[in-house]
């Protein structure tokens, strides 16, 4: 843990958020690490298995209740007050508000920054170099989205070119999804690869991990749990 002291430099702009909270990272390479989460509102996809529909599904949520506009300077102060050495910027799709993401990442100097993105938006150069870990989750056919909506080759190439990206795929059906992942990985030269079971219950996550372990190992991929589901954390 680091303690950040002193006033942050002036940070301009605002962001539309769903929520912010302290927890630990439940997924991907940095699983288990304590962090400050900043969840941006809005998304450019509508995945059937989405576990954060409150960030975009206005048929079920009222945007004026499910989101709030916040000055980035206030977010920076909030992150610094947490004294966590890692911030996770997530969504929705945070890259739809890239200037705000960049301002937040710059303002939280000294804090490691992880951005979770669906991989459809290429990062600006100054953001690409500030982010310590890009967790890119290209969506598969199991999302219900069209290929052209969910796979953006230029954005995937730009994220891969940062040298700090991992590619994490949500698996709903091991017998069907892994070949599709392999095809995307080969076509767009993505890696390292993480696969993670879809699911919002302990049983589903544990069953999914058990089913993924052997085939993922055979393919040279990593397996991610969903620790927040297993522990009931936020
Ligand atoms: S890209 Fe992520 S946040 Fe957006 S709809 Fe799909 S699962 Fe939900």
Image (cartoon, helix red, strand yellow):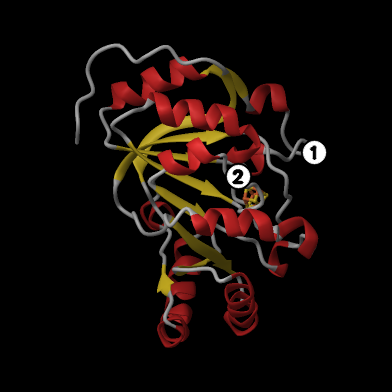
Q: Is residue 37 above or below residue 14?
A: below
Q: Which residue is mark 2?
A: 52
Q: Secondary structure at mark 2?
A: loop
Residue at image point 31% right, 23% down: 80
Q: Is residue 203 above or below residue 66?
A: below
In this rendered view, identify the residue nearer to me: 18 or 119. 119
Left or right of 146 on screen, residue 198: left
Q: Secondary structure at mark 1?
A: loop
The disc at residue 87 is: none
Q: Quadrant of the N terminus?
A: top left
Q: CA distance from mark 2 to mark 1?
A: 13 Å
Q: Quadrant of the C terminus?
A: top left
Pointer 2 with pointer 1, Cβ within 8 A: no
Q: Residues within 10 Å of mark 1 (few under 14, many from 20)?
A: few
In this rendered view, identify the residue nearer to me: 201 or 39. 39
In this rendered view, identify the residue nearer to me: 27 or 2. 2
Q: Is residue 190 above or below residue 1?
A: below
Q: Quadrant of residue 94?
A: top right
Q: Is residue 3 above or below residue 52?
A: above
Q: Position of residue 152 (x, y in %)?
A: 70, 57
The disc at residue 59 is: 1
Mark 2 or 1 closer to N-term? 2
Q: Position of residue 79 (x, y in %)?
A: 36, 26
């Amino acid at each position: 843990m680091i303690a950040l002291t002193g006033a942050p430099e002036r940070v301009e702009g605002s962001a539309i958020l769903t929520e912010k909270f302290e927890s630990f990272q439940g997924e991907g390479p940095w699983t288990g690490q304590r962090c400050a989460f900043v969840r941006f509102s809005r998304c450019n996809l509508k995945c059937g298995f989405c576990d954060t529909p409150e960030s975009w599904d206005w048929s079920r949520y009222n945007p004026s209740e499910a989101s709030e506009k916040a000055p980035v300077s206030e977010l920076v102060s909030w992150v610094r007050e947490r004294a966590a050495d890692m911030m996770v910027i997530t969504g929705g799709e945070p890259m739809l508000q890239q200037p705000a993401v960049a301002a937040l990442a710059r303002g939280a100097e000294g804090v490691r920054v992880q951005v979770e993105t669906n991989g459809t938006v290429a990062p600006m150069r100054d953001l690409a170099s500030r982010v310590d870990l890009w967790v890119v989750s290209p969506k598969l056919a199991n999302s219900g989205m069209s290929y052209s909506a969910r796979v953006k080759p230029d954005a995937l190439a730009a994220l891969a070119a940062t040298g700090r990206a991992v590619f994490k795929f949500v698996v709903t059906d091991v017998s069907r999804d892994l070949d599709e992942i392999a095809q995307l990985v080969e076509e767009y030269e993505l890696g390292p690869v993480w696969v993670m079971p879809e699911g919002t219950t302990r049983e589903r996550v544990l069953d999914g991990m058990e089913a993924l372990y052997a085939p993922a190992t055979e393919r040279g991929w990593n397996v991610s749990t969903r620790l927040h589901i297993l522990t009931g954390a936020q």
